[in-house]
Amino acid sequence: MSLFVAALAAAGAVAVSGALLARGWLRRRAEARAAERPVVGALARASAPGKPGAAGPRPSRRPPARRAELDRSGAVGDLGLGDVVQVEDETRWLGSGLHLRDGRSVRCALWFGATEGDERVVVSFPLPERHLYWLARADSTLRAEPPSQLDLGALSLDRCLSFPVEIEALRCKPPDLGLSAAAALYQSPSGVAALVLTGTRLTLVYVGRRIEAGDYIRLGNAGPTEP
């Protein structure tokens, strides 16, 4: 009988000791978790998107596009400053230009190559027109207002548009046409095209061909020339 009582007493002591140990472990765990909460909260706040000092890797940002590509300054129709355009095996980089205005309306834009002394030009028109004039400077003896027909040797071009012109320069010095300046566009049934700018001081003639939408490629934007 005495052995049985001793065994029960020993078992009770072990149970009490285990309960005390478990209680102590739970208390220490609770204290540790309480100590961790401020640290975990700080990390969570620091890692939140849009917060300064975020921990861990930030989302990658694409480098900003060049300003010229964003606004394509003065774009008229499909073309703007800095565009690179290809027709067949010829490529032109549009480094500067002129808006040809009739009052408040831009009738067309005259784009010059980015290389100094390059007298090739491209003419673009406001949408929905998508064709271009692919031209180059030509000699001319014209001195008066643009004629109704433009004679180029054995070829005559009919005038399809004429208007008193005001010129807005884009990254270039505008031509000094003088007073009473006018612009005229010409075209033949075979696709030969011309642009004439006349004034009391100067006449400029550009001759080439009409390029239909789909027959040219805008390769991208290389940025305009430096001012």
Image: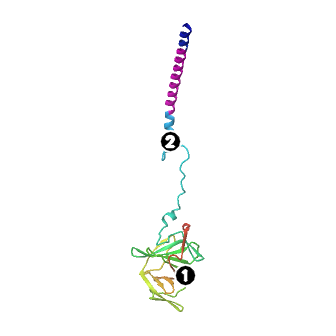
Residue at the limit of the structure toward the right, as seen here: 89
Pair 2/1: label in front: 2
Q: Residue at x 49, y 40 (%)?
A: 44
Q: Is residue 32 above or below residue 101?
A: above
164 in the magenta segment: no
Q: Which mark is residue 115?
A: none
Say if 55 sits above or below 97 in the image.
above
Residue at point 51% right, 74% down?
A: 111
By secondary structure, the bulk of the magenta-drawn segment is best described as helix
Q: CA distance from mark 2 to mark 1?
A: 63 Å
Please state the horizontal and vertical placement of residue 214, each as a whole percent of the image: 52, 75
The amino acid type, in three-letter code, at marker 2 is Ala
State which tag comes first along the sequence, 2 or 1. Answer: 2
Which of the image's four quarters has the C terminus?
bottom right
Magenta-colored span: 11-36
In this view, which residue lies farthest toward the bottom? 154
Vertically, is 28 above or below 212?
above
Q: How is the image coloured?
A: rainbow
Q: Identify the amino acid type marked 1.
A: Arg
Foreground residue among 203 and 93: 93
Front position in the image: 109 or 167? 109
Residue 30 sits inside the magenta stretch: yes
Of the pair 128 and 83, the residue shown nearer to us: 128
Q: Which residue is mark 1?
A: 137
Q: Nearer the viewer, residue 159 or 146?
A: 159
Furthest toward the front, the residue is: 1
Judging by the rendered image, the residue that carries numbered circle 2 is 46
Which x, y percent locates residue 67? 51, 62
Q: Position of residue 8 (x, y in %)?
A: 53, 13
